[in-house]
Amino acid sequence: MQINCHLSRLIEESAKVYGDRTALIYKDYDHKQWVKVTWNTFHKRVTATSLALLSLGIKPQENIAVFSQNKPEFLYCEFGGYGIRAVTIPFYATTSSAQVSYMVNDASIRVIFVGEQQQYDKVFSVLSICHSLEHIVIFDKSVKKSDMDHISVYFDEFLRMGLNDDSLLAEYHRRQNEATFEDTANILYTSGTTGQSKGVLLLHSQYHFAFEAHTKVLPLSEKDIIMNFLPYTHVFEGAWTKLCLTCGATLAVNLRPQDILQSLKEVRPTCMCSVPRFWEKVYQGVLEKIENSNPIQRKVMEDALKIGSEYWEKYKSQGIPAPMGLKLKYEMYERTVIKLLRKTLGFDHPNFFPTAGAAVSPEVERFAHAAGFGFVVGYGLTETCASVSFDHFTKKCTMGSIGRPLPGVEVRIGEENEIQVKGPTVTPGYYNKDNETRLSFTEDGWFKTGDAGYIKDGELYITERIKDLYKTSNGKYIAPQLIEGKLTIDKCFDQAIIIADKRKFVSALIVPNYKELAVWAEAHDLNGLSNEELCTNERVRKFVYDRIETLQQDLAHYEQIKRFTLLPKPFTMENGEITNTLKIKRRVVYQNYADLIDKMYEE
């Protein structure tokens, strides 16, 4: 059953149906246990948030901001805003002070909710240059406020502001009755790999259409337990979470990203959306476990994954019956080795696990399907309210594709093989940026994704990011993401960025996985070296060179890395080198490491 009403009423209508069933769970770290929040309690807190916002004078379609990591309070505020027709603008918990001030001023925000000390400190530090900001509401009661602070309240104080006021309650009901699907629900500021962030407008109508379309092809139900791992600010997690709520599923809110592996074992979810990097880490962990097993266990585990991969890729994904011998062997492994593997990771009750946000390597995709995770590969953008396409369970799935278009969404291939999208889920444009809006659409109204691809047998494939397609000085075109993906799938490499544009050959800046490198170094009598010393050690460089050669052996000669530089420290958000969604800002990295890059091209 799906309750796909206007988001201003979703929690209220769901509470009428589900009552004292569990809507949310989250971990209480003080008592080391997961705490339940019923649908009725969820509804009460959302309503209290709506009334408190009204007490602060928030007007219809006024912008409010939530600057926090994932917390139940984040959801109370978002839906509380919807309840009075406010527009919610989520900020990533790691957003810099400069970006906070930019977004607050751009959107004329008067009220901002902050999660913990780090977010509070950043907001308070820019208060003097954010002239619209009047109220700060703090989720975490342990946050220490500045002695100069006269505008902040804690969330429990805030919730009491609108209680027992009949006029506010009447206004709340009036706003709900006046809400339309053409109202703006969110403004999501894109991370901006090349320049200043743009605020993507998302209407209630986009969500409404997307929810109905997804449930036509995804088997979500009130029986599902959903692990919320990605930030709610990310359109993938934000839209996915709302979709799950329309289906009555229970949300498990992972408060600390670094605890996700432990949270999975404690909650054992049926679904979780994630980016491919998460599955790369899982894959690397399983390979390491296999490598450290005794010869008999290693052979059994390797054979189980090989059989699982063959069963899915050649038969199940194509809707073709598998040969009896292969089917029986797979079922035997599925009941034993594969089942045990999933249980060890916390995935012993899988329904399906969507992944999107970057390219998925063939090795990871084969592994995920072989292990029976119900892996769903998809593609989408903030501007399309997440999904453009994804694997449909009832139709053929081909390795390497990014699925079939969401029902009701049109996809075509335009100039330069660009993937272009049209439909009810596409944004009307960017907040306060008419020129950028105009440039993002074709003359006949199709949104230009900036990604190149093709369609074959109804499935969509992505080949490269058009803006990131490099041309060497020899006239050869290079897709850097393809090469970078081959490196970062290896457990010895943490980050990599390719250099090739207008250069004679391909080079790379590489951040090793220093934990793995330290293990190798100790085994080769090089323990005790600093990261800087490891980067310049000739034996280490030879080791890295050999791994690169193995990983890129199927690339064309002109695509292969000829020179590389090892970096002792990773690219960071603090240095402006990666976005909040962990995408590398190429332009910034090229500027920061210009001397090292130029040195690789010296004769």
Image: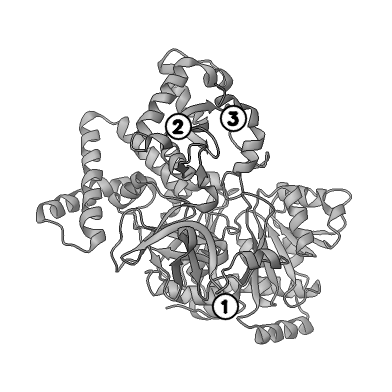
State the separation of the CA atoms marked 2 and 3: 13 Å
Image-quadrant location for residue 591: top right
Disc 3 element? helix
Closest to the observer: 418 or 534?
418
Closest to the observer: 102 or 344?
102
Residue at the outermost top position: 525
- Residue that mark 3 sits on: 597
Disc 1 element? helix
Q: Is residue 299 left or right of residue 77?
A: left
Image-quadrant location for residue 440: bottom right
For the N terminus, the quadrant is bottom left
Residue type highlighted by circle 3: Ile
Horizontal and vertical percent for residue 482? 43, 44
Give the crowd class for mark 1: few <14, some 14-19, many >=20 residues within 10 Å: many
Numbered marks: total: 3
- Residue that mark 1 sits on: 205
State the separation of the CA atoms marked 1 and 3: 47 Å
- Residue that mark 2 sits on: 561
Residue type highlighted by circle 2: Ile
In this view, the mark in front (1 or 3): 3
Horizontal and vertical percent for residue 424? 52, 76
Up the image or down, 317 lies above or below 405; here it is: above
Query: Which label was assigned to residue 546?
Result: none
Disc 2 element? strand
For the C terminus, the quadrant is top right
